[in-house]
């Protein structure tokens, strides 16, 4: 128990340090335009401080990984909390390596906030260390999940560099198709931020809505009773054919369709609706505050950055992350699936979306190497690829049920 508590403290320390690092990185890049400041000296001074804050945070998170592994007796990747936290660890690791190669401060301004968002997302899920179910009691847990997370972490750096390229190069003086799509990407990221904020807030308020379903299940005494579903977020959509046992802040507006089977399907749909709503509201507030597109707000901080260098960083990150992801998410996954379920492939939702991610990045590399898709085309594909990964992490986990639903979603 003491090791588990220590691991939680270390992760909290890492989170705080990542937040501080993100803030200092923003100051390093935006403050260089302040009057009376030497831009290069300002960026160098604050950039180094932000980098070392990230390093110390990474060391604290390394302590979390080690202590959680020892306490649980297995790699800390067996549920959604552990996996997302480990994915965040891989994102920060990939960033630290990329920074040592290129010494480009602005990368931290985009990657560290992404790390903060992912770690905050992990806190949404239950943190308890639970015994492994039989399907997970294998050494392939360490090999498959950790390698897949590492691949996605490296691809995240490719996404950040691609996004920087677009923010740097897309003209913001007029509305175009590119500016609209860039704003859409930023809105998608804000939807994840909005979901984290909403879920954390209502979890603390404890204003749950409880529904009773027509289906029955056995209780601890073996007696049959009606199934119940608890919503942490206010209920926009109710389970099909359910009755409200405990009312929440609002009355459900409609019922989930009958084909949404399973007691958690409607709750997951409700979560997704709140993610979209909160993200759009957050985006609208930021637009009102700055009175301009978010891309236009961010663009000045990238003035003076060579777009070709950003394109190179994105490509190199993806060219490294792609084979790592291939090994972890596909090859190792199929070997483990054969051992656990007696088949290499079963069209489970998580398997399908892993294949979609792999096919997309395969197309990215093919088009770049054989068709010469560099610059803007390459950047758009790197951004879209990671958006697909986010869909896999958020939408597939929160809405679609499958064999991977043991992950505590």
Image (tube, rainbow, N blue to C red):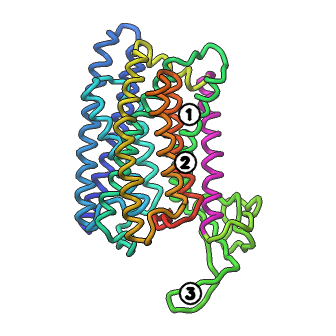
Residue topped by disc 3 = 218
Bin the neighbour count of mark 2 within 10 Å (Cα to Cα): few under 14, some 14-19, many 20 and up: some
Q: Quadrant of residue 236?
A: bottom right
Which residue is outermost to the front?
370
> Can you give x and y, in whole percent of width and height, for residue 352 in the image?
53, 55
Residue topped by disc 1 = 186
The answer to whether the residues at label 2 and label 3 have Cβ atoms under 8 Å apart is no
Q: SS at mark 1?
A: helix
Residue 353 sits above or below residue 209 on the image:
above
Residues rendered magenta in the picture: 264-292
The answer to whether the residues at label 3 and label 1 have Cβ atoms under 8 Å apart is no
Q: Is residue 83 left or right of residue 371?
A: left
Mark 1 or mark 2, earlier in chain: 1
> Can you give x and y, in whole percent of width and height, for residue 242 in the image?
72, 73
79 vs 343, nearest the viewer: 343
282 vs 97, nearest the viewer: 97
């Amino acid at each position: 128990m003491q090791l588990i508590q220590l691991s939680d403290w270390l992760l909290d320390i890492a989170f705080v340090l990542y937040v501080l690092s993100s803030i200092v990185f923003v100051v390093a890049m935006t403050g260089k335009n302040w009057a009376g400041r030497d831009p290069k000296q300002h960026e160098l001074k604050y950039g180094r401080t932000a980098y070392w804050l990230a390093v110390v945070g990474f060391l604290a998170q390394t302590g979390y990984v080690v202590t959680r592994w020892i306490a649980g007796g297995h790699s800390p990747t067996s549920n959604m909390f552990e996996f997302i936290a480990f994915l965040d660890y891989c994102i920060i690791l990939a960033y630290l390596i990329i920074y040592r190669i290129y010494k480009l401060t602005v990368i931290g301004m985009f990657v560290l906030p992404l790390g903060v968002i992912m770690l905050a997302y992990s806190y949404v899920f239950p943190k308890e260390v639970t015994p492994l179910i039989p399907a997970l009691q294998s050494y392939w847990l360490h090999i498959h999940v950790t390698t897949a997370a590492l691949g996605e972490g490296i691809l995240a750096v490719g996404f950040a560099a691609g996004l920087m390229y677009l923010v740097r190069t897309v003209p913001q003086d007029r509305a175009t198709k590119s500016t609209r799509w860039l704003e859409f990407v930023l809105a998608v990221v804000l939807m994840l931020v909005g979901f984290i904020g909403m879920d954390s807030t209502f979890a603390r308020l404890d204003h749950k809505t409880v529904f009773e379903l027509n289906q029955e299940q056995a209780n601890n005494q073996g007696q049959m009773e009606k199934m119940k579903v608890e919503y942490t977020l206010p209920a926009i959509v109710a389970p099909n054919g359910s009755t409200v046992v405990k009312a929440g802040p609002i009355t459900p507006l409609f019922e989930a369709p009958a084909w949404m089977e399973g007691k958690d399907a409607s709750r997951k749909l409700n979560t997704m609706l709140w993610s979209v709503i909160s993200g759009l509201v957050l985006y609208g507030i930021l637009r009102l505050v700055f009175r301009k597109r978010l891309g236009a707000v961010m663009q000045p901080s990238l003035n003076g950055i060579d777009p070709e260098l950003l394109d190179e960083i994105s490509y190199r990150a993806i060219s490294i992350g792609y084979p790592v992801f291939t090994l972890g998410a596909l090859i190792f996954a199929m070997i483990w699936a054969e051992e656990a379920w007696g088949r290499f492939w079963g069209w489970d939702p998580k398997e399908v979306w892993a294949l979609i991610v792999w096919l997309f990045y395969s197309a990215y590399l093919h088009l770049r190497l054989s068709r010469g898709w560099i610059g803007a085309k390459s950047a758009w594909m790197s951004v879209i690829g990671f958006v697909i990964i986010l869909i896999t992490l958020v939408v597939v986990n929160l809405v679609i049920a499958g064999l991977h639903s043991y992950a505590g979603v």
